Image (spheres, rainbow, N blue to C red):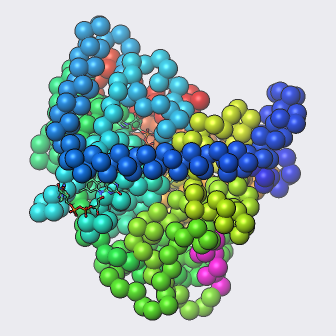
Amino acid sequence: MSRKTENGHAGGQDSQTSKNPADKSWLAYILINYRWVFVCFFLLPLSLVYDIYHLARSWIIFKLNSAPKKHDERVKFVQKQVREWNRQGRNTPMCTARPGWQTISFRQPKYKKTLFNVKVNLMDVLEIDTERKTVRVEPLVSMGQLSATLNPLGWTIPILPEMDDLTVGGLIMGTGIETSSHKHGLFQHICVSFELVVADGSVVKCSKEENSDLYYAIPWSYGTLGFLTAVEIEIVPSLQFVRLEYKSVSSLDEACRVFEEETLKEENNQFVEGLMFSLNRGVIMTANMVNSAEPGKLNVISRWYKPWFFKHVESFWGLEETQVEYIPTRDYFHRHSRSIFWEIQDIIPFGNHPVFRYLFGWMVPPKVSLLKLTQGDTVKELYENNHFIQDMLVPMSTLKDALLCFEKEVKIYPVWLCPFKLPKAPGMLRSPSGKQELYVDIGTYGVPKVRNFHPVETTRRVESFVRSVKGFQMLYADSYMTEEEFHSMFDHTLYNQMRKKYDCDKAFPRVYGKVSRAARD
Ligand SMILES: Cc1cc2nc3c(=O)[nH]c(=O)nc-3n(C[C@H](O)[C@H](O)[C@H](O)COP(=O)(O)OP(=O)(O)OC[C@H]3O[C@@H](n4cnc5c(N)ncnc54)[C@H](O)[C@@H]3O)c2cc1C
Ligand SMILES: NC(=O)C1=CN([C@@H]2O[C@H](COP(=O)(O)OP(=O)(O)OC[C@H]3O[C@@H](n4cnc5c(N)ncnc54)[C@H](OP(=O)(O)O)[C@@H]3O)[C@@H](O)[C@H]2O)C=CC1
Ligand SMILES: CC(C)=CCC[C@@H](C)[C@H]1CC[C@@]2(C)C3=C(CC[C@]12C)[C@@]1(C)CC[C@H](O)C(C)(C)[C@@H]1CC3
């Protein structure tokens, strides 16, 4: 990571060096400043091999049409393990056996080492039902796999969180959001039904009609009510291109106003997104799927030589007229994937250079899981102390105050803005008014540019602001809230009832026990 905070050394780096003087050594220097050598020559090719292997595997399974038959067998295997846990006396709570380095989060869960690990290796698309407009999938199906499956058939899921390796299971047990969320809600809101193996080893199905209490309690429960084994998700027709409009905004007030106005035009705008490049400079994007592109306006952004998407967006800032472009739909869905939003800048600082693009551009991005597996303690500490990664979900009416809060506390740009609808429904996320509300996800990923950044204190101040406006924190990120604060942010009423009903106390930790900072390495 090459950039530093304004004070040139960033509080945390001090603590890092003073803790272990050996970190000053040439090895630490090389690991930090030349991580790209390892990434380019080792991780990029390995990521490619890994992806090709998975694509080939899914393709063969699809051709053999073997997944639906195997599904029941695989669910029985999950049941067998849970029954074995019951037989052994229910001593330690359970979690999935998915290794921590594979999860899309900065940290590794500590509890994987101590809890009873249950293998839930279900990773196939089971059935596409175009009459009912649903796709039935297993929990380890990833977003890249799902878009590769559905798009050629002319379908997509209404919300497609864009990082290729996000899994259906993780997005339901945690949460998922994308630029169509102002129309469709969060990932949980496009799910029709869940199939789970619960603590006694039985299979329970739930939907709005069947076991609806469990259905509403599953999202944000982080695998603490049961093991997910299949999900039915809505599908909608997918057209070939996305027609994207870029509107430049030049003040904070204008940014908030245009962003809210465009979000409210729900019928006109299928997708709404904002990128702020400073407190007063931003580009608001609105988009719709279309079947043809105007000549000369097609931009295939996934090509190896194309600039990172956020850089491309920045180039529209300052233009008076709204700019229009057409992007292939799948490229749009994964538009920030190649640059891992803007994190790639810190990993490969010259990632936009033509020579790099020519030699390696077609292989990016490196897989987040492999980066995580190989980052080592030095890089990890550097990120821990000098990096801030948070998504905060706040009511749209508080967007301006929230942006001012982030400016004061971290001053990281670009800032990602993504609106979403919070429907009135029971569960962890209660709309404060009891009615449907409009929220916005504010994503900040990068190196803070303020003098007084402190990973714990700064995050706690931001968390406190978010609680004060009745917002929510996305829990893949570091959370420093106490259990009490956590309970005041998330409504545990239904969750507690379901914990009792499905006898979860000895079977699974509580959500806080899985997502708090103390539970993660
Ligand atoms: C279940 C499934 C999984 C897929 N997985 C991947 C993947 O991991 N990576 C990737 O790149 N592409 C995947 N695809 C997409 C697939 O590779 C492309 O659709 C490809 O263009 C299909 O090849 P084809 O034209 O030779 O087959 P086609 O002749 O178009 O399709 C016929 C086959 O599709 C199956 N089929 C048709 N409709 C359905 C349906 N509604 N539900 C289930 N099966 C159906 C039939 O069993 C038949 O064997 C998947 C598609 C499906 C349906
Ligand atoms: N655009 C977006 O919406 C983005 C979302 N994210 C976040 O990333 C995370 C998803 O990452 P991903 O790597 O896919 O998932 P993870 O492996 O991080 O899983 C997240 C949680 O879901 C639980 N879980 C996953 N599968 C099952 C299952 N089959 N049964 C029971 N519990 C399960 C895990 O339990 P256990 O601990 O027992 O394994 C874990 O607590 C989410 O938290 C999401 O909010 C990140 C980036 C972008
Ligand atoms: C709601 C939305 C859009 C969230 C986007 C979140 C991403 C920006 C996050 C998710 C996982 C994430 C924390 C990650 C990292 C950056 C920010 C990511 C990609 C990186 C790649 C930074 C570099 C680190 O060495 C390491 C490899 C461990 C992590 C891995 C996870």
Q: Is residue 466 above or below residue 242?
A: above
Q: Is residue 95 left or right of residue 486?
A: left
Which residue is at a point 71% across and 69% down the rendered structure image?
354
Q: Quadrant of residue 42?
A: top right
Magenta residues (range): 311-318
Q: Nearer the viewer, residue 74 or 243?
A: 74
Query: In the image, is residue 492 above or below residue 445?
Result: above
Instruction: Say whether residue 287 is left or right of residue 424.
Output: right
Left or right of residue 411: residue 76: left
Residue 102 part of the magenta segment: no
Nearer the observer, 208 or 226: 226
Residue 493, image x and y in percent? 30, 36
* Image vertical order of residue 267 relative to residue 415, above or below: below
Residue 404 seen in render:
no
**Image-quadrant location for residue 199:** top left
Residue 155 placed where, x, y %? 26, 66
